[in-house]
Image (cartoon, helix red, strand yellow):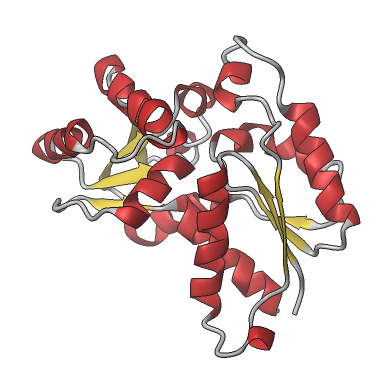
């Protein structure tokens, strides 16, 4: 099998979750049936949202250097468990020889398969929203991904930064659960979990809603396993 590289650290729990999902999708019964994986959890990478909104240090040089270290370490295929960092995807892949899987593209393919014509909302950081990487309407007239209102976006940012990234436990789920109920009442049929911290949240808690969740991190893990086994 090929070796997977994880360009991680954004944040550490999301990095760990991607590896857990890789193990889950591999379904190995012995150590040898699992996929060799090199993880670089580079927590020195500056905040991507701050960089995109020009309030902080540019993370691109750190992302490129981290990818190069994985590349030089002998990995064959790389996954990056950070949605916002995919804003820099095109620049990063110019600097490495390894395959690099784009989970935004995997999300687009997933919507084509089962969510055309559905009312979809994106839950993500302000940086991801600002980049428009999940705005697929310019590719397909039957896809409309709506961004949250400024008030709802603040609920999400608090959940991502003050509840999950900060390591606060227990997490206060009530505002997030109320947001999900409100989205359901407004007719949304699917939510893109466009932040790996939210993927982490959904791996720990189940939410009693009829909304379907599109999880880019899970799609990434599944694709990394598929390519590693080719």
Q: Position of residue 155 (x, y in %)?
A: 28, 24
Residue at the limit of the structure toward the top, as seen here: 55
Q: Relative to residue 230, is residue 3 depicted above or below?
A: above
In the image, what residue occupies the spot 33% across and 39% down? 169
Residue in front for this viewpoint, 194 or 11: 11
- Split into 4 quadrants, where in the image is the N terminus? bottom right
Q: Relative to residue 163, is residue 201 depicted above or below?
A: below
- Split into 4 quadrants, where in the image is the C terminus? bottom right
In the image, what residue occupies the spot 60% across and 25% down? 47
Residue at the limit of the structure toward the bottom, as seen here: 29
In the image, what residue occupies the spot 86% across and 46% down? 68
Residue 207 seen in render: yes
Residue at the limit of the structure toward the left, as seen here: 185
Q: Relative to residue 59, is residue 31 depicted above or below?
A: below
Determine which quarter of the picture holds residue 131: top right
Q: Position of residue 123 (x, y in %)?
A: 36, 35
User: Is 101 on the left-hand or right-hand side of 222?
Assistant: right
Residue in front for this viewpoint, 133 or 24: 24
In the image, what residue occupies the spot 61% across and 89% down? 30
Residue 222 seen in render: no
Q: Position of residue 91 (x, y in %)?
A: 77, 34
Q: Relative to residue 75, is residue 32 depicted above or below?
A: below
User: Is 144 on the left-hand or right-hand side of 57?
Assistant: left
Determine which quarter of the picture holds residue 178: top left
């Amino acid at each position: 099998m090929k070796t997977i590289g994880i360009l991680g650290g954004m944040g550490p729990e999301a990095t760990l979750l991607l590896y857990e999902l890789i193990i889950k999708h591999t379904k190995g019964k012995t150590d040898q049936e699992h996929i060799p994986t090199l993880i670089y959890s580079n927590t020195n990478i500056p905040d991507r949202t701050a960089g995109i909104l020009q309030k902080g240090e540019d993370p691109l040089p750190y992302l490129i250097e981290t990818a190069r270290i994985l590349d030089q370490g002998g990995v064959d295929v790389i996954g990056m468990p950070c949605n916002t960092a995919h804003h820099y995807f095109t620049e990063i892949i110019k600097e490495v020889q390894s395959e690099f899987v784009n989970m935004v593209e995997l999300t687009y393919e997933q919507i084509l398969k089962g969510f055309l014509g559905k009312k979809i909302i994106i839950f993500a950081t302000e940086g991801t929203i600002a980049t428009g990487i999940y705005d697929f309407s310019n590719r397909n007239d039957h896809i409309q991904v709506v961004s949250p209102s400024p008030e709802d976006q603040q609920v999400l940012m608090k959940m991502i930064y003050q509840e999950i990234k900060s390591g606060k436990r227990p997490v206060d789920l009530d505002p997030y659960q109320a947001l999900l109920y409100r989205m359901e009442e407004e007719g949304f049929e699917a939510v893109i979990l466009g932040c790996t911290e939210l993927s982490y949240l959904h791996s720990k808690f189940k939410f009693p809603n009829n909304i379907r969740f599109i999880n880019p991190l899970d799609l990434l893990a599944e694709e990394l396993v598929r390519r590693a086994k080719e």
